[in-house]
Image: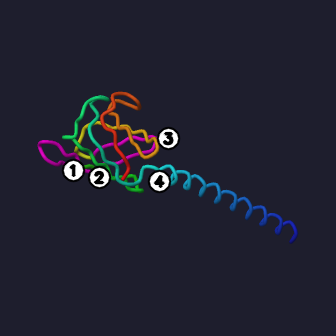
Amino acid sequence: MKKCCFILSLTLGLFVSVLSFTACSSDDDENETKSIVVGTWSGYRYDGPDKDNKNRMLMLVFKSDGYGTITEQDDRGNRSGSFQYVMEGSNKGKIRFDGYVEFDYFFVIEGNQMKVYDKGYGEDIDWILTKE
């Protein structure tokens, strides 16, 4: 009887250990995916390959908790606000602005460059930002 209880408790302990390691693994993957975006990104409005649009600048600051801040500068001055973001892959995600813009932005990160779109991934690029 003691041997049966010992084996049962050993099996139960092993099962609990396996579950806890599995749960930690997904948290690490999520943090690693978010770490690619965390930081300050800034750059100018993209209106085409041969157009200089240095009068409109955007700065996005991504925090590790899924939130961030935005500052946009143009001829009319500076505007700022906050946003939430969610990663939808290892190098892409979606931004939802809080009271600043009424639609989502989509972004794709390639190295230290972020392309920001307003109509989905790869459609109608609006900004090209560089990580500071």
Looking at the rendered image, the disc whose residue lies closer to the viewer, 4 or 3, is 4
Q: Quadrant of the N terminus?
A: bottom right
Residue located beneath label 1 in the image:
80
Amino acid at pointer 1: Ser
> Image check: 5 left or right of 49?
right
Q: Sequence order check: which comes first, mark 3 or mark 1?
A: 1
The residue located at (39%, 39%) in the rendering is 107
Q: CA distance from mark 1 to mark 2?
A: 7 Å
Viewer-proximal residue among 86 and 129 = 129
Q: Sequence order check: which comes first, mark 4 or mark 3?
A: 4
**Residue 52: horizontal and vertical position, in percent?**
24, 34
Q: CA distance from mark 2 to mark 4?
A: 16 Å
The secondary element bearing badge 2 is classed as: strand
The residue located at (64%, 60%) in the rendering is 20
Disc ID at residue 69 = 2
Amino acid at pointer 4: Ser
**Residue 86: horizontal and vertical position, in percent?**
42, 45
Q: CA distance from mark 3 to mark 1?
A: 27 Å
Residue located beneath label 3 in the image:
89
Q: CA distance from mark 4 to mark 3?
A: 12 Å
Residue 122 location, quadrant:
top left
